[in-house]
Amino acid sequence: MIVADASPLIVFAKIGRLRLLKELYDEVLIGPVVKEETIDAGKVVRALGVEQLESAMEDGWLQAVRLTGEEQELMQRLSDRSRLDNGESESIALASARGLQLIVDDKEARSMAAAAGIEHIGTVGALLEACLREQLDLEELEVTVQDITRILWLSPSVVAEVLRIAREAKR
């Protein structure tokens, strides 16, 4: 099980690879803010991939959960003390309070998660994990990373490192 911020969900849905998250983590939790950002707002603008998010919710492996009072307080503290948006603060609060791994791409959100001791991964890291677990082959990883660069800015050094690790593991 993992907690997801909006960006990785949107990216995976846009490239048609949302199902990888189920294969990797079995269940994905999101809070109400992330649901609003991804599914509700996505439906309004007919965003590419929103039907995959809706299907995942219907199938039950993507689950929108209510925040406890403690989680709401933590979310508010994070929002007040940082430049994180509400979705990132919500995702960090959920992962922290529930002791779960977090998938998030925003650099500041990743730093906050690290400072809070939350195990976290980004979209490209999850793709690497899928490749290492043989849910994607090396060619699929390379193509998928290229697809993502059309949607999301990726550090060239991160891309190079991920591809290096995958190629070495496949030798």
Image: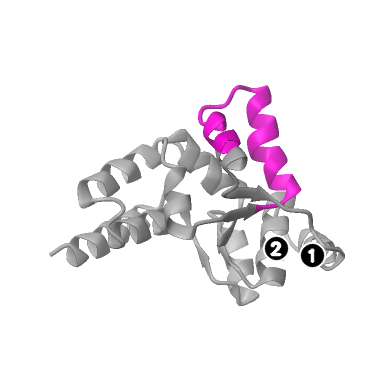
Do labels 1 and 2 touch, CB within 8 Å?
yes
Label 1 Cα crowd, 10 Å radius (few <14 / some 14-19 / many 20+)? many
x, y percent for residue 137: 23, 51
x, y percent for residue 34: 68, 46
Q: Residue at x 61, y 60 (%)?
A: 108
Residue 17, disc: none
Mark 2: which secondary structure?
Answer: helix
Type of the residue with mark 2: Leu
Q: Residue furthest left?
A: 171
Q: Residue at x 70, y 33 (%)?
A: 40
The answer to whether one can see residue 56 in this image is yes
Type of the residue with mark 1: Glu
Q: Residue at x 57, y 31 (%)?
A: 50
**Relative side of 102 to 74, left or right:** left
The N terminus lies in quadrant: bottom right
Label 2 Cα crowd, 10 Å radius (few <14 / some 14-19 / many 20+)? many
100 falls in the magenta region: no
The C terminus lies in quadrant: bottom left
Q: Image quarter for residue 83?
A: bottom right
> Compared to 15, does 27 lie above or below?
below
**Residues drawn in magenta:** 30-55
- The residue singled out by tag 2 in the image is 94
- The residue singled out by tag 1 in the image is 71
